[in-house]
Amino acid sequence: MRFHSHEMEIKCYLCVIKKKEKMKKLILCAATLLAMTTFVACDDDDNNALPSYMIDFVDAVSNSDAKISSITTDAGKMYVPTSSISANTADTTYRCVCTYYPEESATGETLKAKIYNITAVFANNPLPHKAFEKTYEDPLNVTSIWLGGTHINMVLEKKTTDAGTHKYAFREDTLTNEGGKNTAYFTVLHQQPLEDAESYSETVYLSMPLTNYPDADSIVVSINTYTGKKQFGFTY
């Protein structure tokens, strides 16, 4: 399978989920915070201070007009945006990080939210060893990692000079059954370009789907950090 590169100048390419692709051999999938599409809803009055807002990983759905029609948090709350936000593709679900303000609504009314920023994140399904011709585990700092609904959400940091495109993938390592409990093991793969020296830190958002592992009782994710490889376990 060819590289999936999300490279951004002015226009960007959204990492689309829930859309099957034919796969041959995959080396690594490319994604970076700078390589994600960002939609921003601006306030009419720039002098107004922002109210208290939420920042969540969400599933954003576009309608037939290629507008974001709803966002759903990992807790299952669905909000309708109060302003028009364009997406690249109609009738598609995007995995995103969203900054928003939930508006007050009466009981039974549709929940609405003002969207300040919504950014598509890398969220490709994990692939087995055989899907990779070669793998890289260049280090990343782990700011936070948690189980959110059917995803493992990650806020990471790479050290970079912004030379070249960093590439990411999720590798399925093994599935075990001990004492009747099923555990799925994964590794976060990261390839840093040879021309990109480790300099300042830049945030990277990743979200690993678990929908292909409904029988897993536990999830273990390995990440190579700047202080060595670390494992993070979750009850699913």
Image (cartoon, rainbow, N blue to C red):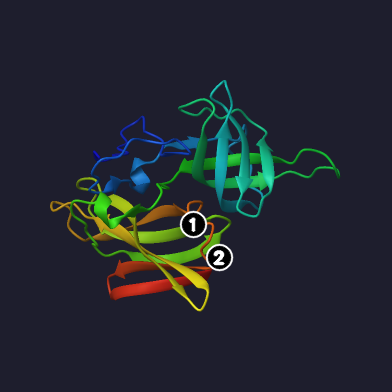
Q: Quadrant of residue 34?
A: top left
* Quadrant of image for the N terminus: top left
Residue type pointed to by label 2: Tyr
Image x and y of residue 64, in percent: 57, 22
Q: Who is closer to the viewer here, 172 or 139?
A: 172
Residue type pointed to by label 1: Tyr
Image x and y of residue 174, in percent: 36, 65
Q: Quick check: 42 left or right of 30?
A: right
Secondary element under disc 2, as helix, strand or loop, is loop
Which residue is found at the position 36% from the left and 29% from the top? 11
Image x and y of residue 210, in percent: 49, 55
Judging by the rendered image, the residue that carries numbered circle 2 is: 236
Image x and y of residue 31, in percent: 33, 46
Which residue of the protein is positioned furthest toward the top in this rendering?
Answer: 65
Q: Where is 154 relative to 23, above or below?
A: below
Say whether marks 2 and 1 touch (CB < 8 Å): yes
Q: How many marks?
A: 2
Judging by the rendered image, the residue that carries numbered circle 1 is: 213
Which residue is found at the position 77% from the left and 38% from the top? 110
Dot label at residue 180: none
Q: Who is closer to the viewer here, 112 or 24?
A: 24
Q: Would residue 73 be seen by someone viewing this image from the given angle?
A: yes
Which residue of the protein is positioned furthest toward the left in this rendering?
Answer: 195
- The residue carrying pointer 1 sits among few (fewer than 14), some (14 to 19) or many (20 or more) residues within 10 Å by Cα, namely some
Which residue is found at the position 27% from the left and 71% from the top? 226
Which residue of the protein is positioned furthest toward the right in this rendering?
Answer: 107
- Which of marks 1 and 2 precedes in the sequence? 1
How far apart, in angstroms, are the residues tagged by discs 2 and 1? 10 Å
Which residue of the protein is positioned furthest toward the bottom in this rendering?
Answer: 179
Secondary element under disc 1, as helix, strand or loop, is loop
